[in-house]
Amino acid sequence: MKQLDRPEIFDEAAFAALESEIAAYVAGPAEEWAQRIENERRVPLELWDELRDRGYLSLAAPTEYGGRGIPFTRYLRLIELFSMSHASIRMIVHVVNGTWRAMDRFATPQQRRAFVIPSIKGELRIAFTLTEPTAGTGADLRCSVVREGDTYYLSGEKHLITFGTICDYWLLFARLAGTRGGDGTVALLVDRHAPGATVMQMDESMGVRGTDHGRLTFDRTPVPVENRLGEEGQGLEIALGGFLTPSRISVAMTCVGLARRAQELAIEYAGNRETFGKRLVQRQAIRFMIAENATDIEAARQLVLHAATQWEAGSSRAAMLSSMSKLQAVEMLTRVTDKALQIHGGTGYWQPNAIERVYRDARAQRFEEGTNEIQKTVIARALLGGGTGA
C-alpha cells in the first residue's frame, strides 16, 4: 500500500468504538501517566509498551504491515484526542504513526522487513533526525557523508532530536560531501550504537516534559549503503514529502486538540469560580472569550481537515496547505491558551493546575515541524516562486 492509498471498505462502527476507547484512555489512564511524567520528568518505558499493546502506535499503518489501516483524515480525529492528554504521550503516538510513512515510500523489500514493519509493531524505535545546531531548515544541511565502497562515513551534528537518546535507529538526513541544496542529500538509517556516534540528552525543556531530546555528534560514523532509503539526491524528498507534509498537518491537529483541552478547562473553571456573587461564566467578558475560542478552534480544525483531504488526494497544493494549517493552528492555539489562562486568573499560573501545563506545552508547537516563519516561507514560495526553506 502506498502512502496515498485508502482502504476500499472502512468500518465506521469499529472506528467509532476506537474513538470512544481513546477518549476514555485520555481521560483516565493517560492522566495518571501525565502526573507521573511531570513528577519524574521522564517518560517511563512502560508507557511505550502500553501504547504499543493497545495498538495506538500502529493506527495509520497498512493492515498488511500489522497496522489498523485508518485513513489519514480519520487518524487526525484520534490525534486530536491524544493531544488533549500529556504532550509526551501525544508525541509518541504522533512520531511512531508518521515515521513509517517516510520510510515505506522508498524502502526496498528488505528495508521494509528490517525497519518499517518492526517500527509499526513497536519492536524498533526510529527517530526522525533532521535539525542541526549550525544550520537552518531543510536544504541547509551541514551533516555530510563520504562514500567508500559499500559504506558511508557520516560526520556532523544534530540536535533537538525527539527520542534521539532512546531510539534504536536515527532516520537521518545528510548530504554527500561537496554538494549543495537538495542535490546530493541522502536519507540514512543509522544505528544509535554505531561507532563514532556520541549521544547527549539535552537539558529539560519548558514544556513537553519527559520527552527526551538528543544532541548528536558524528565522527566518521559508518553507515552501510544498504541502509540508504531511495537514491542519492532524494534525501529532502523523503524528509519533506514523506514525513514533514503530513506531519505538519498532524501537528496542526495537535494544536486543535490542545486548544480544545484549554477551552474545556476554562469552561469548567468559569462554571465553578464565583466573584462578587456571580459565577465567571455569567459575565459577558468571559462569555465572549469562550465564544471567540470556540470559533477559533473550529476554523482551525476545518482548515486542517481540508489540508489532510488534499494530501490524501495527492494534490500539488498539499505542501502549501499543510504549512497554512500549521501556521493558522499555532496562532489559534496561542490565542486560545492565553484566554483560557486569563479566565483562570492568577491561580492558573501555578502548578498543579492543568491549564499551567497546557499553556507550557502549547508554546512548543511554534517550533515543532518548523517555525511559523518557515511555514510562511513555504506558503510564499508556493504562491510566488523562488525563496528558500523547508
Image: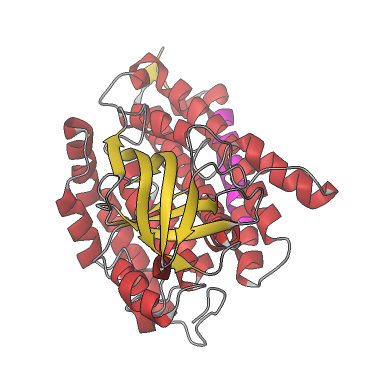
Could you tell me if residue 219 is visible in this image?
yes
- Secondary structure predominantly adopted by residues drawn in magenta: helix
Q: Nearer the viewer, residue 312 or 358?
A: 312
Q: Nearer the viewer, residue 388 or 339?
A: 388
Residue at 38% x, 47% y: name it: 220
Residue extending furthest right?
Answer: 384
Give the image location of residue 123, x and y in percent: 23, 66
Give the image location of residue 225, x and y in percent: 42, 66
User: In the image, is residue 171 above or below residue 228?
Assistant: above
Residue at 30% x, 48% y: name it: 89
Give the image location of residue 227, x and y in percent: 40, 66
239 horizontally vs 93: left or right: right
Whether the magenta-drawn stretch holds residue 289 is answered as: yes
Magenta range is 288-303
Residue at 66% x, 71% y: name it: 314
Residue at 29% x, 40% y: name it: 198
266 horizontally vs 40: left or right: right
Whether the magenta-drawn stretch holds residue 40 is answered as: no
The quadrant where residue 272 appears:
top left
